[in-house]
Amino acid sequence: MVKQLAQGSLDRLIRPKSIAVFGGKEAGRVIEQSRKMGFKGDIWPVHPTREEVHGYKCYRSVADLPAAPDAAFIGVNRLAAIEIIGQLAARGAGGAICYASGFSEAVKELPDGPALQAKLVEAAGDMAVVGPNCYGFINMLDGALLWPDQHGMIRVERGVAVLTQSSNIACNVSNQARGLPVAYLMTAGNQAQTGISALAVAALEDPRVTAVGLHIEGFDDIETLELLGRRARELGKGVVALKMGKSEAAQRATVSHTASLAGNDKVSGAVLERLGIGRVSSLPELLETLKLLHVFGPLASNAISSMSCSGGEASLIADSAVGRDVDFRDLKPEQLGPLRETLGEMVTLSNPLDYHTFVWSNREKLTQAFSTMMQGDYALNLVLLDFPRLDRCDPVDWMTTVDALVDAAKATGANAGIIASMGENLPEAMADRLSQNGLVPFIGIDEALVAVETAARIGRNWKRPVAAPLVKAELIDGDSETVTEADAKAELAAAGVPVPQGKVAATPQEIAKAAEALGFPVALKGLGVAHKTEAGAVKLNLQSVAEVEAAAIAMAGVATGYLVEKMVAKPVAEIIVGAMRDPVAGPVLSVGAGGILVELLEDAVVLPLPTTHEAIREAIAGLKVAKLLNGYRGQPKGDVEALVAAVAATADYVVSNASNVEEVDINPIMVLPAGMGVVAADALIRRRRRA
């Protein structure tokens, strides 16, 4: 786990008043960049032979520095870097960037890499160290750049923070020309000691930072990530993540469907959702969402309006919204009259609105039309407007539209933005101008809609109660064991999960007598078999003693014993409920379509633990199989509340046994008609046996 550091250490590092640089070419570039960007603090080069670097006096060692630096850039080889980090920590420095590679990221080429990385962390002690194997960071609020390369950024007074493990991704982001003001650009490299989450919290606390964007290859420290989500909500600043690595860890072998249903990527998404952190799928989506969060923050809802002077553009955005969590809510009756009066009889009044070119270049009428649309209580009002080439065309008429939108937004107090469908049709200078006038300058229709649904999702999550901390119990030492179905059901029943009435016996004759005592029809199962159906260890709807005995004899070769149960009535739907352990998030629950539909539909949702009845109910409502539970085509509705209670009981069982349960798989839970309850027809538990 990434070491927890005092916030003051990171504050000194990322907002330094003094910078020390160690090394040759890269160190010289750090000095160049900080001076070029107007850094007002002290810069102290450290070099064993040079007298000065770029006009700054050189010092021979850490001990020779005038004082302990707030921040240090260490651009020397990996062995020397460890020594310098130890000296800086002893001197009381604020923190350091370790540029050198050859640590844990290069274990194949350099087997001693992990051991050296451990030495680096030990040498740092309580001093913050970012890296190794990273470029460092850019602070465009104060002109402090511990950054050994070119970049495309300018000084800003306020803006967003973007953080990534990848130095090359950071270089790419630094050259974006989308009108997004970037206050901090930070890389974390190997995250040996200080990870993205801690850096993000430090940046978020800066009052000049408006939102935070994360490019995440792998979660670093779940407790600090939880802190980030909590502080973001408290400060009213949105956080959005581009989470990579759908195969970030190899899926361990499993005896159930649960692990494959959850999967690392689904767990990552569920954790981010729980913490109120938005999630996107590409860098352009990340940057466009940050623009929206920078200007307006999270949205109150997903209801939006769209306006354009072209039916083609209206169709484009309407089609792009299909499958998106955005709502082009109908116009209100009181909007129709004023719009008709402003736009004339030939315009179809709808949302998206094609207002035609009848009012093109008429600022007064455009303002009236836009103002009327904005009075529909939409969370965001959009105008599609691709600007002409400034080197060949005159944009004056387009600016009339911009001015009208600004006028309307000011008059109504509504949120507004402009979408250029193509990046080349929104010059950076124009995007900056729009942002300065309180409009979001979107590039790309799809990206704009992703930004809307992401910002609305953050807003929706913030309205919910703050989630409890994730369960972080470590597994006990010991061998794994798979509990028999009979014992698993007994434990789950004690926890409140309904199970069928059943009996266990060791021989075919004994299980046949037990079946007769239960009453027919019954189901017979062989114990000690992982995948019963494939092994022929399940027989259903047996009607007599003879049938039970014959079935038991047939499966004697694979079974270690027998379980006979009363047959469950025909269900409305079959649901799978399971739990697994994620390497970072700990125990998580999955709920989805069960039975034979598990592989066919892959319809499941992940819930980090602990969870609540409300979260479970909402998760079930979002499943495809919810149509069956709600009474599909005249069929009876399922007992959803009994299902919620059974899922909650399973969750409580896992939380209560978090130190030894590795996996739970209940497939299926038979959901009976409303008022008749649910029954767990099959169950599996895998856990650690204490050494």
Image: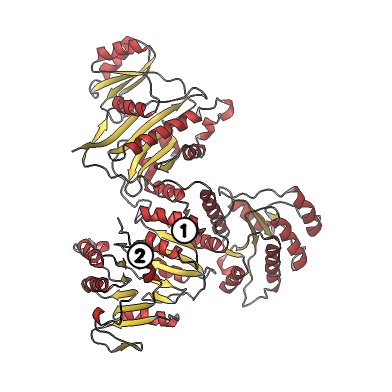
User: Looking at the image, which residue is at 40% across and 39% down?
Assistant: 590
Question: In the structure shown, which secondary structural element does the residue marked by tag 1 occupy?
Answer: loop
Q: In screen coordinates, is 337 left or right of 352?
A: right
Task: Indicate the quadrant containing the C terminus: top left, top right, bottom left or bottom right.
Answer: top left
Task: Indicate the quadrant containing the N terminus: top left, top right, bottom left or bottom right.
Answer: bottom left
Considering depth in this image, is 4 or 51 the residue closer to the camera?
4
Q: Which residue is mark 2?
A: 188
Residue 86: where, in percent of width, then height?
A: 23, 71
Considering depth in this image, is 526 or 17 the residue closer to the camera?
17
User: Looking at the image, which residue is at 46% across and 49% down?
Assistant: 273
User: Looking at the image, which residue is at 43% across and 47% down?
Assistant: 270
Using a 10 Å C-alpha cutoff, classify the residue at mark 1 as few (fewer than 14 neighbours), some (14 to 19) or many (20 or more).
some
Q: Relative to 284, say whether 568 is above or below.
A: above
Q: Which residue is mark 1?
A: 282
Looking at the picture, which amino acid does disc 1 mark? Ser
Q: Relative to 603, say whether 73 is above or below.
A: below
Q: In screen coordinates, is 589 left or right of 416?
A: left
- Residue 210 visible, this angle: yes
Residue 534: where, in percent of width, then height?
A: 32, 29
Looking at the picture, which amino acid does disc 2 mark? Ala
Residue 80: where, in percent of width, then height?
A: 22, 74
Indicate which label's residue lies in the foreground, 1 or 2: 2
- Residue 243 visible, this angle: no
